[in-house]
Amino acid sequence: METGIWPLYYDSFSLGVSPDRLVIDPENEGAVVATYEAKCPVSGKLMNPPHPEYLLQVQAQIHAAGVEEGYLHVWTPEKSSYYRVTRDDLLWATVIKVAERFVVHHLRRDVPPPAAKDLSKEDDALLRSDIVNLLGATTTMISI
């Protein structure tokens, strides 16, 4: 089923996500059971695991739709890869923590974030590496 924008509201900001499709269960009154997102990398190359940005987008869609999993289809004209992405509340809480700090400390104050080389262990760099590590645990390549 096609879909529109799904909002996610947090204390200091909100997000809107738009899955390419919703996977529904016709046996359960059309209940949404998963999200579906398709990507065609500009580079023309498939990666395994896929780009972290793609996986974060699917996690956002999963949380907005209130489902336990989503599917990511990454394709090029030559071939495709499919991934099942499972909901991870710890991962998403970490993502929101980083995003809220960015919104409050940089966007709202119009202060540029520090360069990556200037981040210390106490800064978001550690949280961002946690996010990338957690993403891998939520993703499984599937054969179709």
Image (spheres, rainbow, N blue to C red):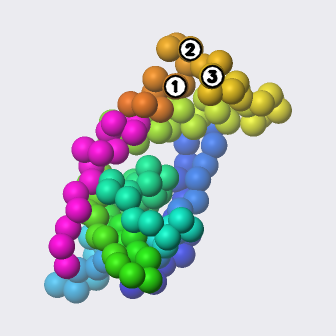
Name, please, the residue furthest toward the right: 110
**How far apart are labels 1 and 3 at the CA level?**
10 Å
Residue 37 shows in the view: no
Q: Which amino acid type is shown beneath numbered disc 1? A: Ala
Q: Are marks 2 and 1 in contact (CB under 8 Å)?
A: yes
Q: Secondary structure at mark 3?
A: helix
Q: Which quadrant of the figure has residue 102? A: top right
**At 67% from the left edge and 36% from the top edge, which residue is drawn?**
103
Mark sitting on residue 83? none
Q: 93 or 10, which is in the foreground?
A: 93
Range drawn in magenta: 131-144
Q: Which residue is mark 1?
A: 125
Q: Which quadrant of the figure has residue 34? A: bottom left
Q: Position of residue 91 (x, y in %)?
A: 36, 39
Q: Position of residue 135 (x, y in %)?
A: 34, 45
Q: 137 or 44, which is in the foreground?
A: 44
Q: Which residue is mark 3?
A: 117
Q: Position of residue 65 (x, y in %)?
A: 40, 63
